[in-house]
């Protein structure tokens, strides 16, 4: 795993997890030009398979970044 390789080389493994609601992802996707737009079925299918990262994966620190169209972004330590 990449975390273990990084740590073995003397680096810290820090994760920034971008937490985006499906509605926000769909809106942002709709704003892309057609050539770069991802089919909605692909976004929803990926969300169903997604597993939220955990500290057990070997990260030294984990931060959750939440996107909000109105208020910018917030960064919180993940628990």
Image: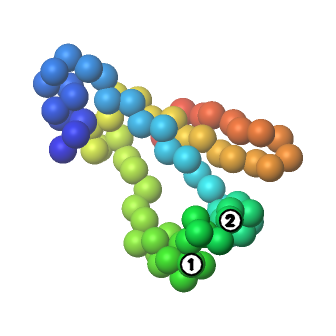
Quick check: 38 left or right of 27?
Answer: left
Residue at the spot x=71%, y=38% of the render?
A: 73
- Residue occupying the far bottom of the picture: 41
Residue 23 visible in the snapshot: no
Horizontal and vertical percent position of residue 65 = 60, 41
- Residue occupying the far front of the picture: 35
Residue bearing the label numbered 2: 33
Residue bearing the label numbered 1: 39
Separation of marks 2 and 1 at Cα, in angstroms:
12 Å
Residue at the spot x=65%, y=45% of the render?
A: 66
Q: Residues within 10 Å of mark 1 (few under 14, many from 20)?
A: few
- Quadrant location of residue 4? top left
Residue 55 visible in the snapshot: yes
Horizontal and vertical percent position of residue 61 = 41, 29
Horizontal and vertical percent position of residue 32 = 68, 62
Badge number at residue 29: none
Q: Disc 2 on helix, strand or loop?
A: loop
Residue at the spot x=14%, y=24% of the render?
A: 8
Between residue 39 and residue 6, name the one nearer to us. 39
Residue 33 higher or lower than 70, as above or below: below
Quick check: 31 left or right of 49?
Answer: right
Query: In the rendered image, which quarter contains the N terminus?
Result: top left
């Amino acid at each position: 795993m990449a975390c273990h390789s990084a740590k073995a080389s003397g680096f810290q493994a820090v994760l920034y997890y971008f937490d985006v609601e499906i509605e926000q992802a769909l809106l942002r996707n709709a704003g892309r030009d057609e050539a770069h737009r991802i089919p909605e079925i692909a976004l929803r299918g990926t969300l169903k398979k997604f597993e939220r990262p955990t500290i057990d994966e070997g990260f030294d620190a984990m931060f959750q970044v939440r996107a909000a169209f109105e208020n910018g972004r917030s960064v919180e330590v993940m628990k």
